[in-house]
Amino acid sequence: MRRWLGKGWDMTVRHKYVGVLLFLYRLLWGFFLFRLVDSVVTPVLARYPDLHPNANAIPLFLIEAEFRLLRTDLLDPLLWLLAGLLLFRMIVSPLINAGLYYSFRHSEEEKSGTRMLAGIRQAWKPVVLLYWLENALALLPAVWLLPMAKDRFFSAGSPGSWIRELLPYAAGWLIWGFVVHVLFQCLQFGAVSREGFGKALMQALSRALPLLAVSLAMAGIGAAASAAVSSVSLLWSGFIAVALHQAFHFVRTLLSLWTAASQFAVWRGNE
């Protein structure tokens, strides 16, 4: 596994400028999404009762907030904008994947530079199709799980028991999403390598164990880094904690790039 992680890190270093672009893309996405939600939530929270409300103040606030959010057209512009942002992400993200995975493929031969734009031009159609199909399959269990969760919420004795009852289903959904993601990522690798879906699938299945090991190892590294940053933020307050928290977004982007590169190295199976 160390060999695959090393190969993945070598490809990540060769794509460091792509990592910067991915970081800026995610930063802008998060900023606009936050500002969009904040534009609706802040006016509602501004009417929260003061520090010493009477017994009826908070229930009245909740009733008013529910009425404004669900019974008026306050959310209509927000929902349309969210749908537009989601459509934008569903288009841009697979284009980035196509360019990045294509560049992974050719970096093995050229050992320098990147070929993002060439990858987008040549492989965007199958990668976009696979990306959309992946998301559809990952969300498919919601058709059954969400109505079931709603029914059990009203029959549960308490919110705590309801959550405990749903934990196995949530874990199963998480595992399903992880398997679907890794599988379709390998199919995207095959699409940019022009090796066909059948061969890409067979390569993924034949290397399922190392793919799983590398994916879990990178997830563990990411979780450890996140825990370390959270611990430092709790111990150190002020500018240092804020700067460290903001810098960690770039580290997270770098880890995701390293994960994809390592998975590609395993899928290719090059010694």
Image (cartoon, grey):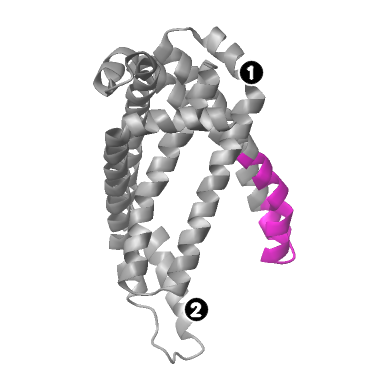
Picture quadrant of residue 48: bottom left
The residue indicated by pointer 2 is 59
Asked if one can make out residue 137 in the rendered structure from this viewpoint, the answer is no
Task: Please name the residue shown 68% across and 51% down the image.
Answer: 151
Residue 23 figure quarter: top left
Residue that mark 1 sits on: 205
Dot 1: element: helix
Q: Residue at x 33, y 19 (%)?
A: 111
State whether the magenta stretch is mostly helix, strand or loop.
Answer: helix
* For residue 68, side relative to residue 271 (left or right): left
Count neighbours of disc 2 (C-alpha within 10 A) and say few if under 14, some if 14 to 19, many if 20 or more.
Answer: few
Above or below, 202 against 131 in this view is above
In-front residue for pair 183/253: 253
Q: Quadrant of the C terminus?
A: top right
What amino acid is at disc 1?
Leu
Q: Amino acid at mark 2?
A: Pro
Picture coordinates of residue 27, whole percent (x, y): 30, 48
- Assess disc 1: are there few (<14), some (14-19) or many (≥20) residues with their C-alpha within 10 Å of its C-alpha: some
Residue 164 included in the magenta stretch of the image: yes
Q: What's drawn in magenta, residue-wise?
A: 151-174
Q: Does the magenta run of residues contain 257?
A: no
x, y percent for residue 235:
46, 73
Q: Residue at x 40, y 83 (%)?
A: 49
Q: Are marks 1 and 2 in contact (CB under 8 Å)?
A: no
**If the image is split into quadrants, where does the N terminus sit?**
top right
